[in-house]
Image: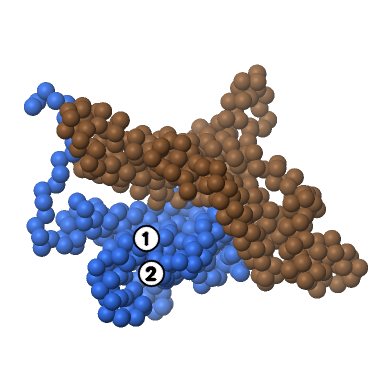
Chain colours: A brown, B blue
Amino acid sequence: MFAFVIRRLGIAAVLLFVISLVSFFMFTLAPGSPYPWGELNPKISPQVKEAFRKKFHLDRPVWEQYALNMRDLFTGRLKSIKDERPVLERIGERLPATVILNIYAISLSMIFGLLWGVWAARRAGTPADTVSSVAALGLIALPGFWVAYLVLIGLVKYAGVPVLGTQSYGVEFPNLLSAMLDRVWHIVLPGTILALGGIAVESRYIRATVLEALKENYIRTARAKGLPEEDVFYKHALRNAIRPLITGIGSLLPALVGGSLIIETIFAYPGMGRLGYEAVLERDYPTLLAINFIVAALILLGNLLADVLYAVVDPRVRLE
Amino acid sequence: MKSAPAQSQPPSPPPPAPAEETPLHRLRRDPVAVGASCVIAIFFLVAATTALCALLGIHFPYDPNATDLAAKLQPPTWAHPLGTDNLGRDVLSRMLNGSYISLTVGFVAMAVSLAIGIGVGAVSGYFGGWVDNVLMRVVDALLCFPSFFLILTAVALLGPDIRIIILVIGLVGWTGTARLVRAEFLTLRETEYVRAARALGQRAWRVIFRHILPNAFAPIFVTAVVGIPDAILVEAGLSFIGLGVQPPQATWGNIITDGRTYLLDAWWLIVFPGLAIFIAALAFYLLGDAIRKASDTRR
């Protein structure tokens, strides 16, 4: 186990190095410039330009720029081109909101995906199963931003419920509890829309693996020794089908971060997705570099945790 | 055995299929597959017809870019079945015009990622060793980027041109196909007929393309069918944040984007284009799922 974790951390370090290279050179080699002014703007004196270039290491060769940027990233000195605040500070403001949103969405996907998948697997081959399969694919085919707009039209126009941001503004809450509930509501709505696809994907995984497990020899043995069908299903088949639920976390994470970009924009939710989107439009290279790096590190960590958890849950798995 | 609750019965296995039954036969009997195919065929016919008519200068029911400020933001009427937008353009005409773009993006982007995925997966699975190791680490690294964010960044840097959008979606989306093809190759490489072909001294590319690839056809075909709606949804998402195919060319995504300013007053600008995206994507997903079920030999 220990050796496995060390080896995986080593691979992760290599991957992170590649990712940092890709995300740095993608921006520097692309057309366009990071300057906040036009390239030929006559009002900017050469001295100002030179000072700007020096501040962001733009006067160095590209390879040196990369090295200096990475050094600054690790020492926390990397500054945003846009407002010259430390990048880590800007991300730190946004990260908790995104993490909460994603934890909520992943939990929702896992719980309802499991319940739905089991429900469908028990009815495999019946009309109910066909309907649920179509419904699951329907949820995957829904464009998230479209659902968000439909919900917005419904809630804001017909119910008059505030939905944007992380809390309702201009409302006096009588006590702390209702203020807390208000904040929870502002996570629940975007989080649920974000989780819709994940729920459907997980339910299909669970259904498929349970049905696969039901074909195994040990199921025939369990049935042959006269166990009630309930026990065969829940204690033997389902227990062996829990694996994708755990490994699924790893594959859900990148999709969620990407998907939350759109949902965060619609709901004016101050998360990483929106920060990244704004940074792309502003060509704020240092911020983008840091976001890519941190998100990739989080995803790698999530995958590693999933693998370790998998070995803990399933004693047959040996981590090598 | 009426006393036993019906739910606790194990699902009864389907009757054994006759030997000459092919996946195509099973597919034709599946109502979901037939329905999905019909929907896809209709979308194609409509898209092809409007594209052809637009080339000839015929616009139905209206010119998609003709503005009529006297009739702006009209709810659905007989004259404008799906309403008009803020410039008085007919939403139905714009959606018909945009269907061609959405389907093209879906198809070509899928083809690009399929080609790369098959190439990388085949080389990786067939040759193994360090080649496999390097290629799979590249896949791992790509999977660490949230794909939508990567696409968005590339499109923002290179400019939202339709060719660039298609290429970028294709270049980012091949990792799943590569992994699948590699897994198929790892299994098929050890089969007797592949060993026989290699023992006969056939060249690697011939073994790959003539012997292994045709036998991995079904799962690859499924990923191809499912890759189309994936790309359509990504393009819609890009359009939504303003980095998709640019106006005045209409796409399902950018009709919604243009309409969001009038979100609370003009629901028809949001509902209908979204419905088109949803129905098209669902039809492709259903067809892909039906093909996967029909080609599953372990029934």
Q: Is residue B100 visible?
A: no
Compared across the picture, whether A134 is left or right of A221 comes to right
Q: Is residue B119 above or below residue A205?
A: below
Amino acid type for the residue under numbered disc 1: Ala
Give the residue at x 26% y 58%: B291
Q: Secondary structure at mark 2?
A: helix
Can residue A18 be seen in the rendering of this structure? yes
Query: Relative to the observer, which residue lies in front, B266 or B297?
Result: B297
Mark 2 — residue? B126
* Residue marked by disc 1: B183
The mark found on residue B123 in the picture is: none
Q: Against B163, is A271 above or below? A: above
Quick check: marks 2 and 1 in contact, CB under 8 Å?
no
Disc on the earlier residue, 2 or 1: 2
Which residue sits at x=41%, y=74%? Answer: B54
Q: Residues within 10 Å of mark 1 (few under 14, many from 20)?
A: some
Is disc 1 on the same chain as disc 2?
A: yes
The nearer-to-camera label among 2 and 1 is 2
Where residue A305 sits in the image (x, y, percent)?
53, 42
> In the rendered structure, the residue with mark 2 lies on which chain?
B
